[in-house]
């Protein structure tokens, strides 16, 4: 649908004009491909209901920019990033080379599954359950009976911190480490030399069968790690076991029409494989970007994740690393070889859309905002 560039009908929320958009001039060409790229933890402000989640005042991008004395993102600036919201170092563009705008999530909840599903047309009427105080005894008893061994943890925690805290005990007892986060997730961490990878995946499948009904979390996640006490590190063999979307998504419609939907990173996991014709798991942002450039066209993905320790809620050096990651991403997005269109050509211009998320304020730990949409219109 074409957007009237003068349409600013919605009232500003938290200082952001939600309906603002600009459509660059030029004759629209037939759509050949869509690249939908998700930048995790790069939010531009709190959603209208952020206070209900204890996240009032969140604005990751702006606070990262303030912490480092301004960001230098010339490519995203040219595309219209600074026209969405005021960001230190990123001035509004007089003639943006792309469309731009901001949107707020309609579905309740603040997790990866909810957000990605809504991007593809599924709006939920209730949030996935979260467990800030750990899972109830009936869930953990059922899990212990199913896997045939006990468990450690059952707390909301950072994945890197909990394996440092419980990793040695896990090696000694052979019991898996169970934990959750602010997202609706049931995570199982295990050392690869204690619980082999396929056994860990089977535990996750068993947990997925248990987590139904009122305890149907968005994802059960396998978190393998290796190393010795004091030097544990997570391996790249993470695997997400998601709930199947309750209705068709745009990915289903595209694939049903005989077209390709190529997922990069964890995209296929998030949709439980539905609607994705081929999947390319990745181990890092760099690898995801490389696979996207080599294949050229990805209607879904990749997801570019800003690691937890780089989010704006942590220490200034980590904020600086977050700023460098944004700069590298801006450069990567606007290379002539990827995305597969030229930003300087109006008829093949991109759309850049920032969205808010309900997340922790930038002065505290917690899940960051996510979702920059970058797609050819």
Image (cartoon, helix red, strand yellow):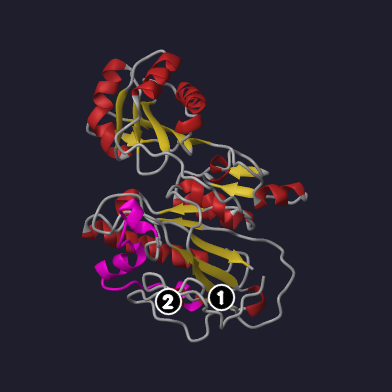
Residues drawn in magenta: 49-78
Secondary structure under tag 1 reads: loop
Residue found at the far right of this picture: 258
Quarter holding the C terminus is bottom right
One can see residue 224 in this view: yes
Crowding at dot 2, Cα within 10 Å, few <14 / some 14-19 / many 20+, comes out as many
In the rendered image, residue 319, in percent from the top left (x then y), is placed at 28, 60
Quarter holding the N terminus is bottom right
Question: In the image, what residue occupies the spot 25% across and 67% down?
Answer: 67
One can see residue 193 in this view: no
Foreground of the two, 228 or 270: 270
Question: In the image, what residue occupies the spot 59% across and 42% down?
Answer: 245
Determine which residue is flagged by label 1. 98
Kindly report the distance in space between the C-alpha atoms of the residues bearing marks 2 and 1.
12 Å
Residue 184 location, quadrant: top left
Crowding at dot 1, Cα within 10 Å, few <14 / some 14-19 / many 20+, comes out as many
Say above or below: 151 vs 332.
above
In the rendered image, residue 141, in percent from the top left (x then y), is placed at 38, 18
Secondary structure under tag 2 reads: helix
Say above or below: 297 vs 219.
below
Q: Is residue 260 left or right of residue 47?
A: right
Q: Going from the N terminus, do you reach mark 2 or mark 1 first?
A: 2
Report if residue 176 lies within the magenta region. Answer: no
């Amino acid at each position: 649908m074409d957007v009237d560039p003068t349409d600013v009908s919605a009232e500003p929320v938290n200082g952001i004009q939600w309906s603002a958009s600009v459509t660059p001039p030029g004759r629209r060409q037939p759509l050949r491909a869509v690249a939908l790229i998700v930048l995790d933890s790069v939010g531009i402000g709190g959603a209208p209901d952020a206070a209900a989640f204890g996240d009032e005042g969140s604005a990751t991008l702006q606070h990262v920019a303030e912490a480092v004395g301004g960001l230098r993102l010339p490519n995203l600036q040219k595309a219209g990033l600074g026209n969405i919201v005021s960001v230190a170092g990123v001035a509004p563009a007089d003639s943006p080379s792309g469309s731009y705008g901001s949107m707020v999530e309609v579905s309740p909840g603040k997790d990866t599954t909810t957000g990605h599903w809504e991007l593809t047309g599924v709006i939920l009427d209730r949030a996935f359950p979260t467990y800030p105080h750990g899972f109830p005894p009936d869930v953990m008893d059922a899990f212990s009976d199913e896997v045939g061994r006990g468990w450690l943890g059952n707390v909301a925690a950072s994945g890197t911190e909990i394996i440092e805290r419980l990793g040695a005990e896990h090696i000694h007892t052979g019991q898996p480490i169970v934990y959750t986060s602010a997202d609706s997730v049931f995570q199982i961490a295990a050392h690869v030399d204690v619980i082999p990878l396929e056994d860990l995946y089977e535990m996750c499948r068993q947990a997925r069968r248990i987590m139904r009904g009122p305890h149907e979390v968005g994802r059960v996640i396998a978190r393998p790690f290796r190393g010795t006490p004091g030097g544990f590190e997570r391996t790249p063999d993470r695997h997400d076991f998601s709930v199947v979307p309750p209705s068709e998504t745009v990915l289903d419609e595209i694939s049903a029409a005989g077209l390709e939907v190529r997922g990069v990173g964890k995209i296929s996991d998030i949709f439980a494989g539905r609607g994705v014709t081929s999947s390319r798991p990745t181990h890092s942002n760099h690898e995801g970007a490389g696979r996207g450039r080599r294949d050229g066209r990805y209607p879904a993905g990749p997801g570019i994740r800003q690691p937890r320790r780089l989010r704006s809620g942590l220490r200034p050096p980590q904020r600086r690393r977050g700023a460098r990651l944004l700069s590298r991403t801006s450069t990567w997005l606007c290379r002539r070889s990827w995305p597969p269109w030229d930003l300087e050509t109006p008829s093949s211009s991109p759309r850049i859309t920032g969205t808010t998320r309900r997340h922790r304020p930038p002065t505290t730990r917690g899940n960051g905002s996510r979702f920059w949409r970058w797609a050819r219109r």
